[in-house]
Amino acid sequence: MDTLCIPAGEGIQNLGGLKQKAIDKMAYIYTVAQHVLVLDRTLENVAYSDTTDTALAAYFATCPWMGRCWTFQEACLAREFSFLLKDRVINPRRWDLTPP
């Protein structure tokens, strides 16, 4: 969905700096967002019910979303953010890893 916010494709540089203007506003967009939902193809195939907390943490740490340059802003500036998994949505800030 990021491509809906940041123009991409051939010839985009010729649109009066539109791509750069959108990139320059990314921090503001994440700051005012009510919630950011991370859609990552790798994580969308992971079922919370079929994995351990340790394995899930490894999935989060190594998913393609983590390798993108803007995701630090996305995670730090958004009021709330969550990852979409196969069987649920999980907010890592509220994820309780303490043993029962």
Image: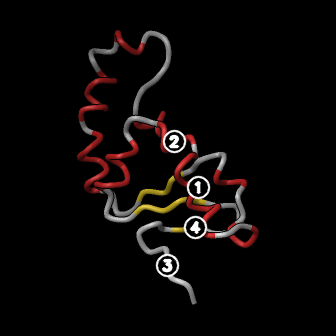
- Which residue corresponds to mark 2? 1
Q: Which mark is residue 58?
A: 1
Pointers 1 and 4 in contact (CB under 8 A)? no
**Residue 14's quadrant in the figure?**
top left
Select label 3 or label 1 by which is in front. 1
Earlier sequence position, callout 1 versus callout 4: 1
Query: Does residue 99 sit above or below 52 in this rendering?
Result: below
The residues tagged by marks 2 and 3 sit, at their Cα atoms, a distance apart of 29 Å
Pointers 3 and 1 in contact (CB under 8 A)? no
- Which residue corresponds to mark 4? 89
Residue at 52 percent of width and 51 percent of height: 61
Earlier sequence position, callout 3 versus callout 1: 1
The amino acid type, in three-letter code, at marker 2 is Met
The amino acid type, in three-letter code, at marker 3 is Asp
The residues tagged by marks 3 and 4 sit, at their Cα atoms, a distance apart of 14 Å
Mark 3 lies on a secondary structure that is loop
